[in-house]
Amino acid sequence: PLPTQGSLLYLDTLRAAFPQALAPRGTALLSWAPGHPCAPAGWPLPTLYCTPSEAGALPSRAAALRVQLLFALRARALRVLEAGLAAELHDALAALHTGWPGLAQDLALGRLSPQPGLPEDVRGRLQALLAPDTVRAAELQAECARGFEGIVQRLWPQLEVLVVGTAHGAEQLYCDALRQADCKGLPFYCPFYQVAGALLGVNLWPEEPVPRFLLCPDWAFCEFLPCPAKEEPRTVLLGELWEGREYELVLTARPGEYRCRAGEVLRVAGFHKQCPVVEHVRRESQALSVRGESITEERFCRSLCRAVGMWPGARLVDYICVESALLGASSGASAPHYEVFVELRGLRDLSEGQRYKLDQCLQEDFPIYKSFRFKGSIGPLRLHLVGAGAFARLREALGSPLPMPRVLREERLLQLIQSTVVS
């Protein structure tokens, strides 16, 4: 579990900002931790949760999220909806979009339907916790029939806040989509900054739109490399940080992990009682580079969103990139290039002109990429459209609840996403 001090700081901050948030059984958890129950953010107060811990430990991510969603739907008086990752909240609500008739039927009958990844003995134990609720089932049917914009607040009218363990970096795409549709009108609170399983900081400002984290010196040993890195970089310690500067994190948190470069870049936003307050900037491990050009994930995402904005009716749901070296001989004899897989809403096919728009946007946004393209050192970008649900399958295949990668490095994951291409 999280350090006790971290969880208690979270609970105190949550109660101060949202006075009814600590109501008994007023929090539902949507989080997958295969093989072992997940310790939620508020673990010192287990009476907070209306979702059974066993539901999150199922072998199947899709089954875990559906079961937790069913228990959340039973509790109309929810105050807090908590997810380990923004992608988990996104995928649970996507399951509501497609599976609400079955969920309503389970609510009405007090039943947990069999499904892949839900062992029968576990299903029996969880089903014993349910009771028929025809009134709530009818309410679910009525609200879903109206559409899904603002559905979260309509289903849980007393909900105060959405707590998301990781809502920055790669997860920001899902937060933005949820804010505009399903979770319209509700605040998001990202309480913790965690890297490689270690808790490094806590967000004491839940009502601010951009998460900021107070670094706590006793939870892990952190060093910082100033950015941009010098030829002979020297790390600095917590008391040597400067406001406004960026640093790469060097972490010593667990046995056998000594002074590891975590690949995370932070910006010092200020200080709180002499402790640094930081904002997450980027993950160095997710930069695209086939010729040393280094396009960071957040800047690539901006270019992609700009290109999608030129495709009438299209909305970006998800994406992932591959450097052509991973494809091996299947990439052909062309120059090194990027392959990008996107899931879209509102568009079923992509014309060649639309596909070229992304390459054009990258050339406009990154002069070094344009230079390599002009010389032929980097080949044209290849864009693929995948079917609905492809990225939920990819997250299941990752096997652990980690923030979504934006650059694939494993052949098995590449083969999975290739199998979902529709255009």
Image (cartoon, helix red, strand yellow):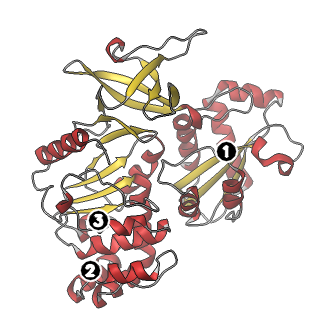
Q: Decide: few, some or many residues near mark 2? Use Cα within 10 Å; few <14, some 14-19, many ≥20.
A: few
The one nearer the camera, 423 or 61, is: 61
Type of the residue with mark 2: Leu
Q: Which residue was labeled with disc 2?
A: 129
Q: Decide: few, some or many residues near mark 1? Use Cα within 10 Å; few <14, some 14-19, many ≥20.
A: some
- Horizontally, residue 34 falls left or right of residue 109, namely right
Q: Which residue was labeled with disc 1?
A: 409
- Please tell me which residue is depicted at 50% across the width and 24% down the height of the picture: 259
Q: Which residue was labeled with disc 3?
A: 152
- Where residue 362 appears, as percent x and y from the top left, is 64, 36
Disc number for residue 260: none
Residue 196, visible in the rendered structure: yes
| N-term mark: 1 or 3 | 3
Q: Quadrant of residue 111?
A: bottom left
- Where residue 380 appears, as percent x and y from the top left, is 77, 41
Q: Secondary structure at mark 1?
A: loop
Decide: is 397 above or below 230. below
**Residue pushed farthest right?**
333
Callout in the foreground (2, 3): 2
| N-term mark: 2 or 1 | 2
| N-term mark: 2 or 3 | 2
Decide: is 306 above or below 100. above
Type of the residue with mark 1: Arg
The one nearer the camera, 369 or 398, is: 398
Mark 2 and mark 3: span between their CA atoms? 23 Å
